[in-house]
Amino acid sequence: MDQNTQGRRPHYNRGRRGPDRRGPDRRTPQSHDQPERSSENVDDEQIMRDIRARISQRHGIELSTQQIQELAARRLEAILDPRSVNPTLMQQLRRGADAAPEMPPPTGDAAYTFEDSTLYESHRGFLRFMRRLLNPILKLFFNPNPIVHALHTQAALNRDAAAREAERQRLQGEWNALHYEILQRLVTEVSRVSVEMQALSLRVESLGARVDFNDRKLRAMEPAPQGGRAQSQSRPPAEQPQVAAQPPASVEPAAAAADGAAAADGSGTSEGTRRRRRRRRGRRGSGGAAEGGAAVVVAGEGLAGPDTIGLNDLDEGDDDEPEGLSGPEPVAAADVAPAPPVAEEPREPAVAAPPFEQPTPPPDEPAPHAPEPPDPGPPDR
Amino acid sequence: MKLAVVVQRYGPAINGGAELHARYIAEHLAESADVRVLTTCAADYLTWRNEFSAGVDEVNGIPVERFAVDRERELEEFGRLSERVFNRTHSLDDELKWLDSEGPLSRGLIERLRSSGDEFEFVLLFSARYYQAYYGARAVPHRAVLVPTAEREPSIGLGLFRPIFRGVRAIMYNSPEERAAITALSDNSHVPGVVVGVGSDVPEHVDPERARAKFGLPNRFIVYVGRIDANKGCGELFQHFLQYLERSGRELDLVLIGSAVMPVPAHPRIRHLGFVSDQDKFDVIAAADLLVMPSFFESLSMVALEAWALGKPVLANAHCDVLVGQCLRSNAGLYYDGALEFGAALEMILDEPGLSATLGANGRAFFRRNYTWPVIVRKYLDMFEQLTASPPAHAMEPLPGWFARRSRSLPPSAALVEALPAGPVHTRGAGAAAGSWRNHPQESTA
C-alpha cells in the first residue's frame, strides 16, 4: 500500500500536485535523482535534455516550428497522395511554387516573320537580285501574293499565340505557387492545431483524473452516519425493517435532491423537511414494524438481504444531527442521478408524502463504510 | 621573423570581427616578430571608400601600409552577381566578377605583394572571401597563411576559393566547425591547419557595481554585446525575451551594448546603452547574469569568449553550430531553439546559482586553456616553425584557361553549403553531436 511505517500517507498526497504546483510556467523542482551540479558533472547536453523534457512535460507535446513544418510536409504528402489524387500534382505544385514564372521564349519555327520580300531573300546578293528580276516571270505562272499574305498572317497569329501562352503559363505558375503556399500553410496550421488539440486532450484527461480522484477522496472523507450505524448494529437483525439494499449514504443526498426539486417547484425545502420529520416521529412513536405498528410497505422485499440497513436507521441518524448539519451535500446531490422509485414511504392520512426515489449509486462509488480507496497515484499522469 | 598581415581594413576604430581579429593578432605577434600590416585606405566595408590616406601609417606601434581602393563597391551590381553565383549555375568568370565587385579592389596592394612579398617570411591573409586574400594568396602562395574567418554562408561554397584553400601553406581556423566546413568543401586535408581563434584583452579587475551605478542597472539583467541587427538574431531575441517576461513576471532586464541598425523595442525592461568603452563593457558583462548570443552565423564569438573569461555563462542560439560547439566543448553555456527553450534555459541559469557558477568556472577554464594570448601566439609561432622546417609540399592550382573560366558548369554555391553536414563538432565524449563532422582535437577540452 501507499503508506509509510506510521501508517500515514506520504506527504505528496496533500495539497496541489504535479507540475502546476507553482503555476503552469514555473519550473518543476529538481528531482532527487538529479544531484547538485558540480564542475565535474555538468554536461550541457544532459542539461538541454532535461530542459526539453521539462518543457514537453509542462506543455504536453511541444514541437518546434521546424518540427511542425516537417510534420506538415508529411501531412501534405499524405493529403496529396499520388495514388489517390494525381501522380504529378505534387511535383507540379512544387515546381510551380519553387520555379520563378520564367517562360521559355517561343521556338524559332513558330516565331518566324514573313514579309513580302521573304520569298525572295537570300544571303547572296546576286541570287536575291536575280529572283527579284525574274519575279514578274514567276507571276505569269501563278500569283504568290495570297501565299505571302497567308504566311504573314500566320506569323502574326503565331506571335500572338506565343504571347498568350506565355502569359497563361505565367499566371498558371503564379497560381500554382499561390495554391501550394496556401495548402502548405493550411496543413501547417492543421498540424499545429492538431498537436495543440492532442496536448489539450491530454490536459483534459489529466484534469478529469484529478477531479475523479478528488471526488473519491471527498466521499471517503464525508462524515458517515456513525450514530445510526452504531445503533443499527446494536439491534438484533430481526428488528430492522428491510427496505432496500442500497447504501444509505446515497439515500440522504437523494432526499436532498428531492428537496431541491421541491424547492425548485416552489413548495420550499422547509415544508418537505417538516413533513419528513413528522413522519419520522410517527414511526418512532409506533415502535417499528415488529411492535405491531403500521407496516412498512416494502417494494423490493425480495431483494433485501441480511446486510441491508433500514431507512429508520437513517432517519434516526439524521435526527441525531443538529439542524444546521442536516442539509444536503452538494457533491453527493450532484452525483445522484434520478433513478426509478423502488420504495414508497408509508402514506400518512393527513399529509401526502412526496414519492421517495431510491437512488442508484454510480458504479465506481465506494460503499459508505468501505475502507479508504487506494491512492490511484498522481492524478496528472 | 618578418610577417605581413594583410586585411581589408585596419585601424583602431574599426571594430569588425575579422579586422579586430587581425589587429589583435598583429599586435600580439609583434612581441615575437617584425610585423607589418598591408591594407587598404577604406574604412567602410559597404562602400570601400578611400578614407585613410595612402602610404605608411602606424597603429599602436605597428607599421601599416595603406593602398588605395581602385573602385568603390556598387551595391546593385554586387547584389546581382551574388544572386547569380549563389543561386544559379554559373561560371568561374562570374565568380571572379563577383569577387571584383565585392572588393576591396586594390591592385596596388596585390602588386606590392607580388613584387616584394618575398621580404616577408609569412603573409597572414585575413578573411578568405575578400579580394585581397584571394589575390594575395595567388601572389605569394608559398608564404600565404590563411585566416579564413569563414562563416557558414554561401560565399564559402564558391568554386574560386577551393584552389586557395588547397594551395596556401597553412590555415589558421577559428573553430572546428569552420575547419570541418572548409575541409568538406575543398578537400584540403593535406594543408596544415590548426584551430586557433583569437584571444581577448580582458582586464584583470572588473567592477560590476561601478557599471550598475553608472548605467543605472539595479535589477538582475542579461546582456547582449554586438551590432543590434536582425541578421544577428536580435529580433528573435526581443521576442523571446518579452515572451519570457510575460510568462514569468520576473524582474529581469535585457541590456544591449552596441550600435542599433534595427529598432529596439520601447520596453522598460530593455535597456540600450549604445557604444561604451571596453572597461564599461567588461564591467557590464561582469554585472550580468549571463551573456546572450542570438546570432545564427558566427565564425567565432569574441564576446562569448570574453564573457567566459569573466566567468559568465553564455546562452546561445542553437542554430549557430559554432556557438553550440563552443558551448558543448566548454560546458560553459546553454543554447536555445525557440522561445520555450530560451525561457527554460534562462530560468535554469538564473535560478540555480550553483549551475551558473559552474558554467562560468568552466568558461573561465576553457578560455584560459584555449584563448589566452600566450596560447594563441604559441599556436601561431608553432605553425610558423613547422612551416619553416618543411618546404612547401603543394602548389597553388593555376586559374583555368579562357574558355574553361567561361564554362557555366559551377553549381549554385548556396546549395553546396546547404548540403554540408551540419551541427557542432563534438570533441568531448564518444562521438559527434547533431552533425556528422569528425572530431578535431585541436581545440583542447581536456
Image: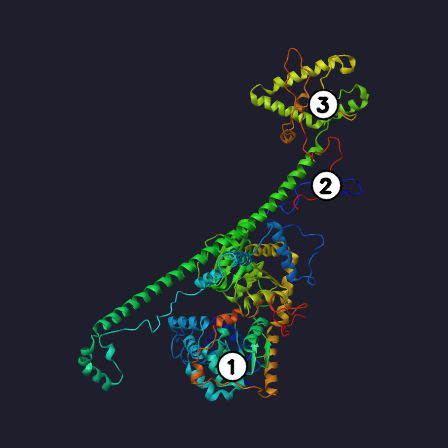
| Mark 3, secondary structure of its residue | loop
Give the x, y percent position of residue B5: 51, 80
Quadrant the N terminus of chain B occupies: bottom right
User: Crowding near pointer 2: few (<14 within 10 Å), some, many (20+)?
Assistant: some
Numbered mark located on residue A300 in the image:
3
Q: Position of residue A293 (x, y in %)?
A: 75, 12
Q: Amino acid at mark 2?
A: Asp
Q: CA distance from mark 3 to mark 1?
A: 101 Å
Left or right: where B331 falls relative to B80: right
Residue A362 position in % (x across, y down): 67, 33
Q: Is residue A207 above or below residue A265?
A: below
How many tags in the picture? 3
Which chain contains the residue that carries disc 1?
Answer: B
Callout 1: few (<14), some (14-19), or many (20+) C-alpha neighbours within 10 Å?
many
Q: Residue at x 74, y 36 (%)?
A: A372
Q: Give the residue type at disc 1.
A: Pro
Image vertical order of residue B33 relative to residue B308, above or below: below
- Which quarter shows the C terminus of chain B? bottom right
Residue nearest the viewer, comparing A132 with A363: A132
Question: Does dot 1 land on a helix, a strand or a loop?
Answer: helix
Image x and y of residue B110, in percent:
45, 83
Few, some or many C-alpha atoms within 10 Å of disc 3 (few <14, some 14-19, many ≥20)? few
Residue occupied by mark 1: B163
> What is the C-alpha distance between the residues marked 2 and 1?
72 Å
Q: Are marks 3 and 1 on the same chain?
A: no
What residue did someone put label 2 on? A375
- Could you say which disc has been placed on residue A213 in the image? none
Mark 2 and mark 1, same subunit? Answer: no
Tell me the SS state at disc 2. loop
Report how far apart the C-alphas of labels 2 and 3 lie in the structure. 36 Å
Residue type at mark 3 is: Gly
